[in-house]
Image: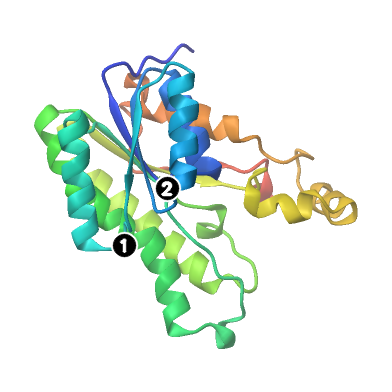
């Protein structure tokens, strides 16, 4: 399917690396103008240059998307640069791999804020512009750990499960206004956070043996899915969560 996102402005939080970068590349290749949001200026510059070198239009906006004042500033800067965005991908997030009794309140709140609070703030800031235009696409990066879980993932599973509820509720609020809201739940993808396992032959072999498709996900597959959900063809899909995990949660 040839997806045309020409004329659309897409905001991607956590767009400086990993799945955020992959989605930025895919949406840019489909014609969207890209607003990258993150805190690492060096990484943001790198991704922006990659997009523009490929013929796309992109700009970056630095800030902490868990901070209300900074989100207001970022939204204003994006509107000044591009006009009101039609696409928002809430991809920012962090993890904490510890047993519950070892997790501090600060660590727990940090994980929840990075996924849930940031999504609330960014959505609240940008939804009015989508309503005015009568078209909008919001994608919230949930996780397979909002459906199943693992030991030591209490903060992350809590945050992502709450994000799934947020996605459903907001989808119902906006359904009659041409704005869809969906989640994407990635499984194991070959991003930086998984390189330690991927580069350990024994650990990698054990992991892949437990994965039905027998391979890591390619980040371009997330990009393709995001493009489809942002397209006109996905206008009847809202309030749901698309699991892309190589069969992990089917077991």
Q: Earlier in the sequence, mark 2 or mark 1?
A: 2
Q: CA distance from mark 2 to mark 1?
A: 17 Å
Task: Give how far across and how far down residue 206 sits, in percent.
Answer: 85, 54
Residue at the disc numbered 2: 41
Residue nearer the viewer, 162 or 172: 162
Give the residue displayed 64% in from the left and 54% down from the top.
Answer: 193
73 on left or right of 141: left
Give the residue displayed 49% in from the left and 44% down from the top.
Answer: 43
Residue nearer the viewer, 230 or 250: 230
104 on left or right of 137: right
Q: Tell which tag, 2 or 1, sits nearer the viewer.
A: 2
In the image, farthest residue toward the right: 202
Q: Is residue 200 above or below residue 42?
A: below
In the image, farthest residue toward the bottom: 101
Give the residue displayed 24% in from the left and 49% down from the top.
Answer: 123
Task: Give how far across and how far down residue 23 sits, in percent.
Answer: 47, 34
Task: Give how far across and how far down residue 134 sits, in percent.
Answer: 14, 28
136 on left or right of 228: left
In the picture, the disc for residue 237 is none
Q: Is residue 115 above or below residue 31?
A: below
Q: Is residue 219 above or below residue 173?
A: above
Please say whether residue 109 is visible from this viewpoint: yes
Residue at the disc numbered 1: 66
Disc 1 secondary structure class: loop
How crowded pointer 1 is (Cα within 10 Å; few <14, some 14-19, many 20+) is rated as many
């Amino acid at each position: 399917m040839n997806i045309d996102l020409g004329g659309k402005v897409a905001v991607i939080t956590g767009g400086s690396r990993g799945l955020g970068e992959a989605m930025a590349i895919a949406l840019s290749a489909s014609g969207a103008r890209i607003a990258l949001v993150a805190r690492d200026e060096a990484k943001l510059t790198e991704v922006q240059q990659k997009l523009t070198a490929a013929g796309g239009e992109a700009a970056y906006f630095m800030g902490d998307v868990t901070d209300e004042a900074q989100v207001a500033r970022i939204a204003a800067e994006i509107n000044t640069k591009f006009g009101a965005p039609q696409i928002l991908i809430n991809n920012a997030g962090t993890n904490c791999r510890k047993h519950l009794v070892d997790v501090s309140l600060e660590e727990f709140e940090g994980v929840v804020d990075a996924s849930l609070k940031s999504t609330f703030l960014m959505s609240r800031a940008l939804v009015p512009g989508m309503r005015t235009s009568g078209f909008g696409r919001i994608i919230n990066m949930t996780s397979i750990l909002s459906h199943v879980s693992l030991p030591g993932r209490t903060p992350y599973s809590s945050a992502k499960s709450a994000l799934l509820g947020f996605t459903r509720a907001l989808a119902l609020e906006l359904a009659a206004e041409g704005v869809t809201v969906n989640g994407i739940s990635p499984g194991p993808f070959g991003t930086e956070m998984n390189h330690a396992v991927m580069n350990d032959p024994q650990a990698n072999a054990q992991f892949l043996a437990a994965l039905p498709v027998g391979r890591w996900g390619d980040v371009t597959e997330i990009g393709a899915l995001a493009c489809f959900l942002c397209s006109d063809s996905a206008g009847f899909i809202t309030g749901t969560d698309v699991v892309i995990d190589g069969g992990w949660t089917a077991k």
